[in-house]
Amino acid sequence: MVETRQAVLANQACCAGENPVHAGPAQDVQKTLVLLATDSLGQGDEDLGRKIVVNFIRTMKEMGDDLWRLVLLNGGVKLAVEGSEVLPQLQELAGAGLGILVCGPCLKTFNLFEKRQVGELTSMVDIVTSIQMADKVISLT
């Protein structure tokens, strides 16, 4: 998915002043970034909040080709470590090409740095850059 977007951008750059021809579906794909900063959504019942996050992760694939990147920070990094209930789904999404960025300092704060099982370690510079590059940002905190 990223390669397709890069190819479109490269085509535009080389054809300055011309109307470049794009491959059909690539121009319709938007880069959607999901920022998940918690392992429990909402206020009230914490167990329900965890179930909501699990269901959200399991349903993310329904976003299709627009889903470009998932950023996990703060409590959200707990989803990317061994023992996480959604680890198989995150590994499947990563295997299908979803970029998953996991906040390294956040993992260290929770003493989970060595337990990360999916995603790339990242810093705030990478997160901010990803937000800038995205066509749409969905933030769950």
Image (spheres, rainbow, N blue to C red):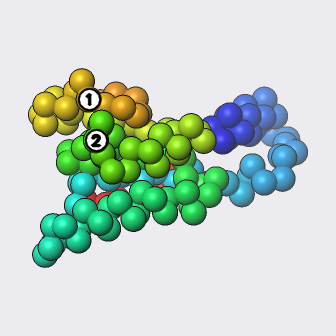
- Numbered label attached to residue 115: 1
Observer-nearest residue: 16 or 22?
22
Q: Secondary structure at mark 2?
A: loop
Relative placement, left or right, of 20 versus 45 is right
Which of the two discs, 1 and 2, sits closer to the camera?
2
Percent of width and height locating residue 74: 20, 45
> Residue 32, can we see it?
yes
Q: In the picture, which quadrant includes the C terminus? A: bottom left
**Quadrant the N terminus occupies:** top right
Q: Which residue is mark 2?
A: 83
Measured as percent of width and height from the top left, residue 95 is found at: 56, 37
Per the rendering, the mark at residue 40 is none
x and y percent of residue 12 in the render?
75, 38
Query: Is disc 1 in contact with disc 2, using a CB cutoff of under 8 Å?
Result: yes
Front in this rendered view, residue 18 or 5 = 5
Amino acid type indicated by mark 2: Gly
Give me the residue at 29% from left, 37% from top: 81
| Residue 125 makes an appearance in the image | no
